[in-house]
Amino acid sequence: MTTRSVRRDLALDFVSPLPPVRSGISDYSADLIPALGALCDLRVVRVDGQEVADELVERWQPVSMAEIGADGRVPFYQMGNNVYHLEILDRAHARPGLLTLHDLFLHHLLHERTLARGEIEPYRETLVHDHGWIGAAVAEPPRWNAYGAAPLFSLPCHRRLIQLQRGVLVHSQWAADRIAEDIEDAQVRVIPMPMPLRERADRSQGAELRRRFGIPEDAPVLGSFGFQTPIKRTDVVIEALARPELTDVHLLIVGVVTPSFDLAAKAAEAGASERVHLCGYLSRDELGQAMATADLCVNLRYPTAGETSASLLRLLAMGRPSLVSDYAQFAELPDACALKVVVGDDEVEALATKVRDLLETPGRLEQMGDDARAFVAREHDPDLVARRIVDACVEFTEHAPGTPTAATVPAPTSLTSRDTTGTMEVQGFETWPAGEARDLEVRLKNTGACRWLGARRGAGGVSLWVQVWDELTGIDINAATAWPELPLDLNPGSKYLFRVPLRRPLGPARLRILPMVTGAPKFEPLAVAPFESSI
């Protein structure tokens, strides 16, 4: 098949939230469906309980989810990480097909599907299946109503879903590489998100918005667009406004702000309340005005669920230069249209410096805008994306749905786990003449759940602390001797025999041996009873 051919023999059931649902994936689907429908036999499926715009109903006559896969059609699910996709997730498990994974991490969605409904065991079962003992450990705190954000961005919870499908599309190479690391046999293709080229934003279009918020005509304006949560790092942008080089810069914050993210308080703390403007959710026309108002856009993200930012692509399509985090999938964007900002201790300073440098060189901003539009036209044209999707779907339909397999996760190690239970036996000290040198035999057995690291691994490595205390002087006469090192990793259930060379003192002494986990910030004993005896 050539990339320009039409495949009416490819019958897809396109399952996604649709406008007016306030979701980036909803907008994505509205942009893609016309181009995709021109290349294959496409049927649109409406998600149960969700409204669909009248113009889409009139043009595509969406069917109910009960008809997914009827008459041999292949389901084509659009999967995201929010509550709009709960029904889609259930259908994709029950009737697998093809899948576009818009968010690499689906842990938030799993949370909504289980813990938010008071269901602990389904949450634990998925975590254990997808992430082994790590998932089991993460699933324990919620039993006691203890929750943390770290697992949401470290455990993706997508293994079973991906393995069930015939094939999976993602929007970045970073996402594809992460899947390949965890699921070797996954059928994955990288297809950019489609984005129509918009009319280039003209600064004059934002004049009304400037008047509404009292922004001087000549004041530089930054823009942050999209649903505002702490991972968008808008608080970092506000903190940068307090730096001396940016005291004349205003910030437009466009999008719904999650209640726990008090940006007004952040602005007051930074002394920038008069220059931070919270716009809330805007209509498409007002959104265009806001984008035109911004001289430079800031789209930071850390951590990430692996999502591609539709709001960022829309900005680039309108010729708005942007700053992004130098992290994960955003690092793939070309510097010509999206400069990178480091994540970490120097983030505020780096952001302020880049903002001031760009605002002082309007010619560079203009060129970045031209390059941004050229990039979108080259990589994200909906017709081109639709052809690539059809090519991938034709290839994928040759595969049968997969069979899920539980994750095989290496055991935790003595670096990360305190479950270092073991036993120790010492032989050779019983009939030991004074002054004689001999090798004592020390047998260590790992009876715990974690792997003991060899000493040469550094932090977390295991060694023996052998002490010989002179009972007359109270001095450890073996203190200057190097600790015998475990030379290899010792798995649960395995044993190792140390031969420890020692000379018995001439006078009364006490022998003490402690297996230790070595390394920064301190040494700790293994969970093994120390050996101690008079010699």
Image (cartoon, rainbow, N blue to C red):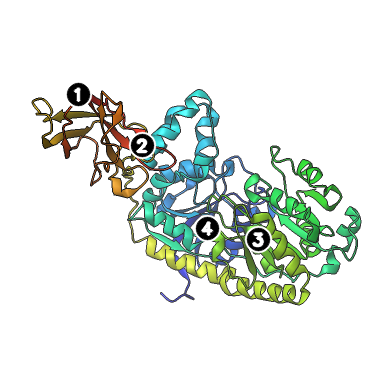
Residue 283 visible: no
Query: Is residue 454 shown left or right of residue 495?
Result: right
Q: Nearer the viewer, mark 3 or mark 2?
A: 2
Front-most of 18 and 434?
434
Front-most of 127 and 448?
448
Q: CA distance from mark 2 to mark 4?
A: 26 Å
Residue type at mark 3: give it: Leu
Local SS, label 2? helix
Q: Which residue is mark 2?
A: 133
Local SS, label 1? loop
Residue type at mark 1: give it: Pro
Q: Position of residue 407 (x, y in %)?
A: 33, 44
Residue type at mark 2: give it: Trp
Q: Which residue is mark 3?
A: 312
Choose top left, top right, bottom left or bottom right for residue 246. bottom right
Q: Position of residue 398 (x, y in %)?
A: 34, 61
Choose top left, top right, bottom left or bottom right for residue 492. top left
Tag of residue 466:
none
Q: Which residue is mark 1?
A: 508
What quarter of the picture does the C terminus occupy? top left
Which residue is at 66% across, 51% downward? 19
Q: CA distance from mark 3 to mark 2?
A: 37 Å
Comes first in the chain, label 2 or label 4: 2
Q: Which residue is mark 4?
A: 328
Comes first in the chain, label 4 or label 3: 3
Comes first in the chain, label 3 or label 2: 2
Comes first in the chain, label 1 or label 2: 2
Label 3: how many Cα within 10 Å (few below 14, some 14–19, many 20+): many
